[in-house]
């Protein structure tokens, strides 16, 4: 193994955003210390388990809001990672942060502890929109947090959203301009998806969400995909843009079929061809660790067919697409032996393009990625090349 990623999940927030269906919890501060202790025990166990499998490429602490933890608890988790895993040569150590939960002292502590990249969930630079989606920070606080982070020596990524209730193209244009003025290295831009069980889903069912029209969302998407490259942010994945050398190494590894270990409640792992998901409930996860039981549950048993699908889906998300040589090395056959008809249909529709080295999405394919991904599903009862 050439190396692997480590993901640590912190399932706490100061307040749950109205669109969020991620495994995170507000109002559970009483569990933070027990969770930290369980997490550190799990990190130590996983580090021992993985020690013979090579070095860590990247570490990513996400959530939730990792910076919602008390600073001492977050720093203890980081110290446990450094003590338990072989980080020599690690390229990237990222912590997600909410602009409303950091100050200069915390940033200094994180940088001293070895964190070199911060990912800020900003979403918008309109205070009206931030309040409407349940964020706890203001636009000014976001700008201040990014400036402090850059001054402290971090690589910085910033998240934006479009298609929000009441959002206009002018709002998106302003957020893009203010993001570029901060000179961050990486920008993620996500369209709003209204997920079941969220406050936004209830508001939509009651007819009071006020989403932009599909045409307006399309205009926002087109503006982002044209303006960010003009500003020097190259699109390297469907939702991600970066200046040269500022791509997220951790997320690139997900899309390139690199193994990773997930630690914490609801964290996923991809290890030795198997995918597992940890117990999602905070108390259930803590109980597993305290009682010496594994919190991991195996997902759908892996097959050659499902591996092919995932290999294709994930690689197609990137600008470089599916590496035909790697596909052949991984599965022992050419990609056209499996997906030749699908590739032909997608080429005719202008959604993919092929070179001697790769199959990748066109600009139109990036816009309608789900249509492309459907073509790469294989019949479950008919694995190509196997009985």
Image (cartoon, rainbow, N blue to C red):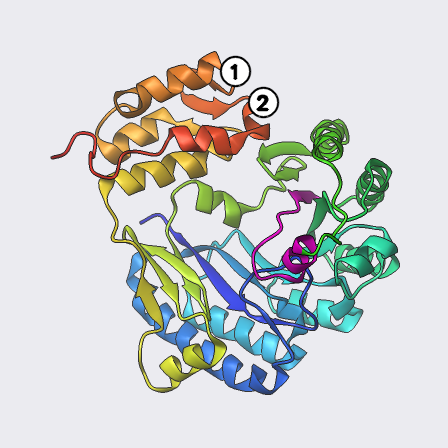
Q: Which residue is mark 2?
A: 364
Q: Is residue 38 left or right of residue 383?
A: right
Q: Residue at x 64, y 76 (%)?
A: 69
Q: Is residue 202 left or right of residue 353?
A: right
Q: Which residue is mark 1?
A: 350
> Where residue 331 appears, x then y in whole percent?
24, 33
- Residue 300: image location, x then y, percent: 29, 54
Q: Is residue 139 magenta?
A: no
**Disc 2, SS:** helix
Q: Quadrant of residue 131?
A: bottom right
Using the image as rendered, state which of residue 25 and residue 72 is in the foreground.
Answer: 25
Residue in front for this viewpoint, 162 or 99: 162
Q: Magenta stretch: give its range.
A: 185-205
Residue 114 shown left or right of residue 37 in the figure: right
Using the image, determine if residue 110 lies above or below residue 204: below
Element on which disc 1 rests: loop
């Amino acid at each position: 193994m050439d190396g692997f990623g480590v993901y640590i999940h912190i399932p706490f927030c100061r307040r749950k955003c109205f669109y969020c269906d991620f495994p995170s919890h507000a109002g559970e501060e009483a569990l933070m210390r027990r969770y930290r202790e369980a997490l550190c025990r799990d990190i130590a166990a996983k580090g021992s388990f993985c020690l013979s499998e090579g070095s860590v490429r990247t570490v990513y602490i996400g959530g939730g809001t990792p910076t919602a933890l008390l600073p001492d608890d977050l720093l203890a988790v980081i110290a446990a990672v450094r003590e338990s895993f072989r980080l020599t040569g690690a390229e990237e150590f990222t912590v997600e942060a909410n602009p409303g939960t950091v100050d200069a002292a915390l940033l200094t502590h994180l940088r001293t502890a070895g964190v070199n990249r911060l990912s800020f969930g900003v979403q918008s630079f309109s205070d009206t929109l931030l309040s409407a989606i349940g964020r706890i920070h203001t636009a000014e606080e976001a700008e201040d947090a990014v400036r402090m982070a850059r001054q402290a020596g971090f690589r910085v990524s910033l998240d934006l959203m479009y298609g929000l209730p009441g959002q206009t193209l002018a709002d998106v244009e302003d957020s893009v301009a203010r993001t570029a003025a901060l000179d961050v290295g990486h920008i993620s831009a996500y369209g709003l998806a209204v997920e079941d069980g969220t406050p936004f889903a209830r508001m939509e069912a009651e007819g009071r969400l006020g989403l932009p029209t599909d045409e307006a969302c399309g205009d926002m998407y087109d503006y982002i995909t044209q303006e960010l490259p003009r500003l020097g942010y190259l699109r390297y994945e469907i939702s991600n843009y970066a200046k040269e050398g500022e791509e997220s190494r951790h997320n690139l590894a997900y899309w390139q079929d690199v193994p990773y270990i997930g630690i914490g409640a609801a964290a996923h792992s991809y290890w030795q061809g198997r995918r597992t998901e940890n117990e999602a409930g905070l108390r259930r996860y803590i109980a597993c660790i305290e009682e010496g039981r594994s919190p991991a549950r195996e997902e759908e048993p892996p097959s050659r067919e499902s591996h092919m699908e995932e290999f294709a889906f994930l690689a197609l998300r990137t600008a470089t697409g599916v590496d035909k040589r790697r596909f052949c090395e991984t599965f022992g056959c050419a990609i056209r032996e499996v997906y030749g008809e699908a590739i032909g249909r997608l080429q005719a529709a202008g959604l993919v393009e092929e070179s001697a080295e790769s199959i990748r999405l066109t600009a139109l394919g990036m816009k309608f990625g789900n249509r492309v991904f459907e073509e790469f599903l294989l019949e479950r009862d008919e694995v190509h090349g196997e009985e």
